[in-house]
Image (cartoon, rainbow, N blue to C red):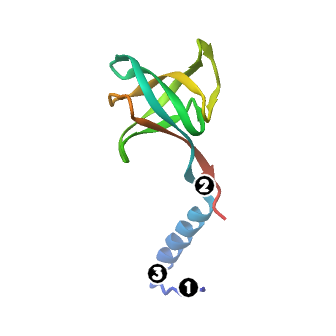
């Protein structure tokens, strides 16, 4: 639909138009969930760094940010800093595969927790 607006001063009109243009031009950030991993074991915990092992339950897991899920509740966030499969560095782990990873997070990870790996993308508004 068409919006009709009234202004008492031209400055208010210019501010409004500028705001509308910014909304059209600035890209918006969107999250894309890539995959989930179920934590099977925690091998090492020190300060904000932990080494955990698990199985990819769906999608793909990469060196990206994640949400830490305990049950259905989000209990924290973090980032995967390295990913390994049988002592070999890998770029990604696919559904059904097991892997070990070094993560940075302020929350202690427990066996049974799930990591929801996501990618932040900037999308242009249309």
**Mark-to-mark CA distance, 2 and 3:** 30 Å
Residue at point 39%, 21% (across, down): 42
Percent x, y for residue 111?
Answer: 38, 28
Q: Earlier in the sequence, mark 3 or mark 1?
A: 1
Residue pointed to by mark 1: 3
The image quadrant that residue 89 belongs to is top right
Residue at point 59%, 31% (across, down): 62
Give the SS element for disc 1. loop
**Is residue 88 shown left or right of residue 53?**
right
**Mark-to-mark CA distance, 2 and 1:** 23 Å
Percent x, y for residue 50?
Answer: 40, 21
Give the SS element for disc 3. loop
* Residue found at the far top of this picture: 87
**Mark-to-mark CA distance, 3 and 1:** 18 Å
Marker disc for residue 27: 2
| Disc 1: CA contacts within 10 A as few (<14), some (14-19) or many (>=20) | few
Q: Nearer the viewer, mark 2 or mark 3?
A: 2
Q: Nearer the viewer, mark 3 or mark 1?
A: 1
- Above or below — where is 27 with respect to 108? below
Residue pointed to by mark 3: 9
Percent x, y for residue 30?
Answer: 56, 52
Q: Are marks 3 and 1 in contact (CB under 8 Å)?
A: no
């Amino acid at each position: 639909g068409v919006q009709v607006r009234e202004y008492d001063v031209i400055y208010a009109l210019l501010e409004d138009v500028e705001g509308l243009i910014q909304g059209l031009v600035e890209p918006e950030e969107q999250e894309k969930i890539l995959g989930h991993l179920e934590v099977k074991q925690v091998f090492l915990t020190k300060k904000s760094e932990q080494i955990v092992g698990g199985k990819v339950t769906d999608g793909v897991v990469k060196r990206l940010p994640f949400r830490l899920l305990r049950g259905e509740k989000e209990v924290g966030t973090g980032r995967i800093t390295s990913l390994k499969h049988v002592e070999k560095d890998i770029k990604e782990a696919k559904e059904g595969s097991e892997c070990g990873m070094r993560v940075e997070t302020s929350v202690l990870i427990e066996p049974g927790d799930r990591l929801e790996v996501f990618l932040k993308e900037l999308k242009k508004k249309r």
